[in-house]
Image (cartoon, grey):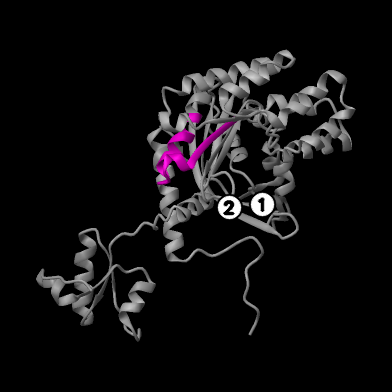
Amino acid sequence: MTDIRLPAGVRDFLPRAAARRRGLAERVLGLFEAWGYQRIITPVYECADVLERGLGDAGRAAAIRFVEPGSGEVVALRPDFTPQVARIAATRLGDVDGALRLCYEGAVHRLAGGVGQREVLQAGVELIGAGAPDGDVEMLAVAAAVLGAIGVDVVETRLDIGHGALARAVLGQVEGDAHDQLHGALARKDRAGVARAAAVLPAAWRPLAEALPRLWGSPADVLAAARALAWPAEVTAALDELTAALAASRDVIDPALHARITVDLGEVRGFDYYTGLRIAGYARGAGDAVLRGGRYDALVARYGRDAPAIGLAVDIEAIAAAQRAAEIAPPTAPAVLVIGERGEAMRAAAMLRAQGVRAAVDLGGAGDRAAYARALGFTSVVEAREVLAGTTRST
C-alpha cells in the first residue's frame, strides 16, 4: 500500500478536537462582533509581491511561495492576515472616513525551520484609523476580554505589554553581524551575551542595551527603571504613551486581570514591524502566547492609505492547549442517533431537527451500536417510535 502521510507541520482534527476549535473560533469571533468588529473573508493565497509589502522580515522569510499554474504569477500562502486586511482597508474600503473595525478567522501557513510548513488556526481583529492612546486602550480591552472568555481562571492568565521603541533604538545603532548577535542575545534575554554584543555600541548606548533584558515585571517598577535611563526623546515619548494606555485601561479591563499585567520593554520580537504598543496574552498550559498583536502605523500606507492601525491575532490551538490543561471539556450539543424502521426513523429524525436537535438515522452495520454512537459524538440513542409517540427514552 502507498505510504499515507501528511506534510510536516499540519494535522487532522477529528470530531471532538474540531468541535473544540470550532467552538473557540466562534466564541472569539462573537466577542469581536460584540465590540463592533465586522467579519471579512480573505483568500488563502495572494500575489507574493503584494502580500509581502505588509510583512516584516520574519513574515517574508516564513512565506510559502509557488507559481500559480493559470497565470504564471508567483503567489504566496498567507503567513499572516494583517497585510490582507491592510490591503482591503486601503483599497476596497479606502473611501470610508473614520475608523474601521474588521475581524477574521482561518488558517495561516508558514515555513517552520527545516521541517516544512506549519498551519496555524487564528482569529483576529484589526482597528484601522485609530491612533494612540484610544486605539491602544481598546485593543488592550479586547485582548483582556479574550483571556476572560476562554474559560481558564483569571489567575492562570496574564497580559504582557511593551513598546518596540526601546529595542528599535538600541538595535538601530549597529549593523551586520554585530546587529544579529545583539538581537539574538536580547531575544534570549541573555544578559552576559548582551553585554558582550553591546561592546561595539557607542559608549552612551551600552548601558541602555544591557538594561533591556532586566526591564520586565510589574508596570510601576519597570517603567520607573526605564525612565531612570538616558533615553532619546522618541523613547521617552514611547514610555509616556505606554503609561497613558495602562492608566486608561483600568476603566475597561477586569481589575483581577489588570493587576496581573506585566511590562516587557526588552522584547525584540517584531521590533521592525510594530511601531508602538505590543501585546501578548498568556494562559497556563499553552506553550506560547495565546494571542499577540500591536500597533503597526506604517503598514497600511504601503497599500496606499496613510492610517494608524493596531490589531491582534488569537492562536486557537494555543487556547485549546490551555483548555486541555485546565481540564475543560470540548463543547457538546445534543446529538441523537435514531434507530428503528427506516421510514419511522427518518420522520423521527426530521421531528427532532425541527426542534433544533441534531439527529441522524442509524444506517446499520455497527456491531456495537452504543460504542459506535460514542465514537461519533452522539449523546444519545433513541427509538424512532418513542420519538413519534412523544415518550422518548435515550440510551
Q: Is residue 277 left or right of residue 380?
A: right
Q: Which residues are magenta?
A: 140-161
Residue 89 shows up from this direction: no
Residue 283 placement (x, y as % from top left)? 51, 44
Q: Amino acid at mark 1?
A: Arg
Q: Is residue 71 left or right of residue 22?
A: right
Residue that carries the numbered disc 2 in the rendered image: 120
Which of the numbered marks, if any, corresponds to residue 110?
1
Give the Cα separation between the discs numbered 1 and 2.
Answer: 8 Å
Compared with 162, 104 (above or below) is below
Q: Is residue 147 magenta?
A: yes
Q: Amino acid at mark 2?
A: Val
The residue depicted at 35 percent of the width and 86 percent of the height is 367
Asked if the residues shown at circle 1 and circle 2 are in contact, with their CB atoms under 8 angstroms apart, the answer is yes
Compared with 72, 155 (above or below) is above
Q: Nearer the viewer, residue 69 or 364?
A: 364
Q: In the figure, residue 336 lies in which quadrant?
A: bottom left
Q: Is residue 124 magenta?
A: no
Element at badge 1? strand
Q: Quadrant of the N terminus?
A: bottom right
